[in-house]
Amino acid sequence: MSEIVSWFSGGVTSAVATKIVIDKYGKNNVKPIFFETGNHHPDNERFFIECEKWFDIPITVLQDENHSSIYSVFEKRQFINSPFGAPCTLVLKKQMRQKWEKENKFSCQVFGFENEPKEINRSLRFIREYPHTNAIFPLIEMGIDKKMALDILKENGIEAPTMYQLGYSNNNCIGCVKGGMGYWNKIRVDFPEVFEKTARLEREIGASCIRNQYLDELEPSRGRMSKPYVQSCGIFCEPEGVIL
């Protein structure tokens, strides 16, 4: 059979989705791919190693040769974020995926969208907009949400990435420009150097990541905060959206 590519984001849902398709189709038929943006938490290395042992196959890491981080994209584009998306996602992920599609043969593409209303709607839009991908969504098919995915990892001896333990809803870049006010006020506390770097870049470019709000003017009390993700008591006890 043609190769099945599983887009491994570094998060818990894509990890579980990848393992499901490996178990179903065999490790020789699945290729997990991760797009490096240069801004992930150092704990990603530990999580990747543990996932590779679980998968029993390596994760292929791809990175745009012209950009070592999200900041170089912002500086080159002189643009950070808008209601239509962020240039870092376009350049470092979407265009990289499209380039891979043109250069490789595949039978289908696997995405770790979780079994949650917003993610289900997102999957339907994706199928409609990108029919050539033959996309499959194992977690939606099996009714698995993010907390259940965390349980599955725990039961297999894999600790969730540090960003989840700190209370972030995804293991995205540290300082994701698609985050809201609460997210950035949490970054201000947990990663002050990232907050300051992004705030300086906003002024240099003359564009902000939060609509009509420069980070250096953001009041520390603004925004909605979240609690760390924790495992439920078991998987049978009981999803590119806006962050915090």
Image (cartoon, helix red, strand yellow):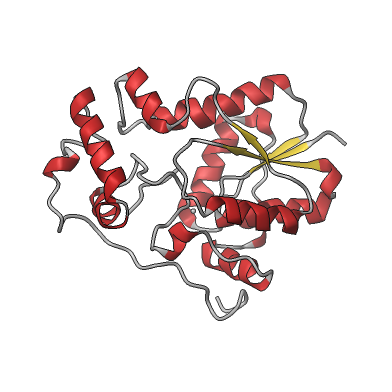
Left or right relative to 48: residue 21: right
Q: Position of residue 99 (x, y in %)?
A: 62, 21
Q: Position of residue 192 (x, y in %)?
A: 27, 50
Q: Give the mark count.
A: 0
Task: Examine the rendered structure and indicate whether residue 145 appears above or below residue 234.
Answer: above
Residue with the most extreme right position: 1
Quadrant containing the N terminus in the rendered view:
top right
Q: Residue at x 85, y 44 (%)?
A: 28
Nearest the eye: 174 or 14: 174
Q: Which quarter of the picture shows residue 89?
A: top left
Q: Residue at x 60, y 63 (%)?
A: 144
Q: Which quarter of the picture shows residue 3?
A: top right
Q: Residue at x 50, y 44 (%)?
A: 122
Quadrant containing the C terminus in the rendered view:
bottom left
Nearest the eye: 130 or 158: 158
Q: Which quarter of the picture shows residue 16?
A: bottom right
Q: Position of residue 24 (x, y in %)?
A: 81, 54
Nearest the eye: 168 or 109: 168
Residue 20 in view here: no
Q: Residue at x 16, y 36 (%)?
A: 212
Left or right relative to 57: residue 183: left
Residue 123 in view here: yes
Q: Position of residue 75 (x, y in %)?
A: 33, 22
